[in-house]
Structure formats: C-alpha cells, structure tokens
Image (cartoon, rainbow, N blue to C red):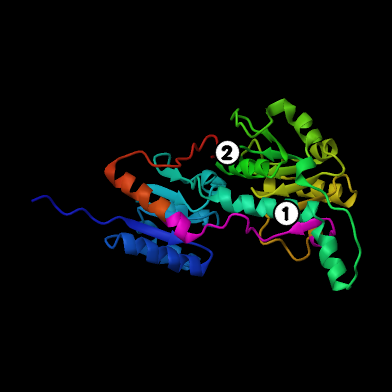
Amino acid sequence: MAPKKRALRVLLFSHNPDYVDRYRRLIKKARKDLQVFVCKKRGEIARYISRADIIFSGHTFPLEFIAKAKRLRWIQSMSAGVENFVRAQSLPSDVILTRVEGVFGPIMAEYVIGYLLAITQNMKAVFENQKRRLWQSFLVGSLRSKTVGMMGLGSIGAYVAYKIHLLGAEVIGFDEQAKKLPYVKREYSGPELEEFLKLADFVVVTMPLTSATRGLLGEKEFAMMKNTAVLINISRGPIVHEKALLRALKQRKIAGAVLDVFEKEPLPANHEYWQLDNLVITPHIAGPSIPEDIAPIFLENLKRLEEGKPLRGVVDRKRGF
C-alpha cells in the first residue's frame, strides 16, 4: 500500500486581518485537507515559514522571510502587481510565481470612470457650492470630447479602455506590445511616448512596475503633456517621479492628478502632496484584493499544481510581470 501523501502547507498572510480570516474560511471550506498557517503578524510568519510549501500573500509580504522558506514550491500573489516578489534575490528560480489576472479590471474601471466624471462634471464646485448654499450655474465638460490615454494595455488597462470607450471618449494606448484593440483608436510604443502624451486630456497609468517603467513619467514627460491634462495613477507609485510631479502640479504644468499609489505607503502625513488643491489622494483602494474574488483563483491553481498542469498567471520574472 502506497504511503499517504502529506497535505500541502499554505502560509496565508495579509496586512488586513479581516481579509486573512475570510481567505481562511474560503480555502478551508473548499479544501479541508489543507494545512493553512494563518499569519497576521511578522512573528507568525517567522514561526511557520520554514514549513510552508506555498505562500499565498500580497505585495506587503516581508521579503526577508523568503530565504527561510526551504520547502517553498509556489507563491500565489493576491494582486496583479508582483514586483515585491520579483525583486526577492533569495527566491529560488524553480519556485513558481503567479499573479492574479482577469479580476481587477471591472472594479478599477469604476474607480477611473468615477474620477473622470467627477472632473468633467466639476463635482468639486458642486460640493463647494452646496456647502455654501450657493446657487450658481456653471458649464460642465463631457467625456465625449476628451482623449483618454491608457498607459498599459494589459488585462486591466484593456478593460478600463473598453469601458471608457463605451462612454464616448476617444481612447489611445501606450504599450510595448501591440494589442490591436478595436476600441483603442491608436496604440503607441517606445519612442512615440511624446506624441501619445501630447494628445491625451487624461493619462491613466495601468502599467506594471519594472526596471523599464520605474520613473517613466518625470520632468520631461510632464512638460510634454497639455497644461489642461490630468494624470490618474492606479498602478504603482514609483512609475511616477514624485518630485517631478509635485513641481508640475505646483507650477500648473498639468491641471491635476488623481493618485491611488505612492512611492511610500502609507503616504506620510508631512508629504507635500497633502497641501495641493489640484491633487486627489486615495489610499491604494482602486483595486482591492477581495477574498471572494481571489480565493477561487488560488484554489484553481492549487488543483493544477497537484495535477501537474501549468498554472495560470505565471510570472516571467525576467520581464517582471
């Protein structure tokens, strides 16, 4: 009689304690045989990491523990961005790294469209006038007369572009790989960045953070943009050079920005961004990793791992995504 296989051991970590408990319930409901190490604090990771076959976590996982994961076979990220795991030098090359695909587009499209409409409909004036009990007519804009430039046409960017197109805006795209999307009027790449930026009334960043995209938008690029343009970044903070953006906003080289991501998170209370009246700050909420959305992806990939099938969302660690 063949010996019974040992159940796989999963280290589950999230900086959100409520999410950890929800993930655990969803996983254990589907797979009672799994041994799940639920970690809410760094000390708990230290206790279990050497016994884990699998890490199921997001971009806040402390990388210093990777070197102690001697049994590790696979990391499933809870997010689309995986730059934290990619840069972990102690991660062996034979460990599979997978990211979430096909989940965040719809909810991130709602975020982007919400702010596009808030800006074109001048909702800031609406709220201010209501507080002052002031009846004052003013003209509003329309997305139908705007060009929205999508920087990044992966699964998230493509979905956001499609939804914006349905509202009547002209959509252009910038990506290193041609996607030939029918709802994107023209796609640009590489040396065409200047032409792309000059045309856009809104620049929406949905690119992954890699060595090629880090600091991609800086002083020179903001000078290329219209002084009426608005930047919306829902990807990763370091893609935008913070000091350059700060100067561009202060000097009104661009009209404004909506930022959900930053070089350092949480954004420090003394950061100059908080003082700007042409900047909207949100606390990394554009694409939440909702357990009920993400757990099924983990469970499907787990089944594939056990059956020796290719996993979905495998990351090319050389490219960074």
Total marks drawn?
A: 2
**Residue 149 appears at what percent x and percent y?**
72, 38
> Which residue is farthest left?
1
Tell me which residue sits at (45%, 44%) in the image.
Answer: 97
* Position of residue 240 in the picture relative to residue 110 (left or right): right
Q: Is residue 170 left or right of residue 307?
A: right
Amino acid of disc 1 = Tyr
Residue 265: x and y in percent read 66, 59
Residue 105 location (% of width, % of height): 57, 48
Q: Residue at x 50, y 45 (%)?
A: 102
Residue 69 seen: no
Residue at the image position 54 percent from the left and 47 percent from the top: 80
Disc 1: CA contacts within 10 A as few (<14), some (14-19) or many (>=20): some
Q: Residue at x 58, y 44 (%)?
A: 156
| Foreground of the two, 87 or 132 | 132
- Circle 2 is placed at which residue position? 154
In-front residue for pair 66/209: 209
Tell me which amino acid carries mark 2.
Gly
197 vs 10, left or right, is right
56 over 192 or under it: above or below: below
Magenta-colored span: 274-295
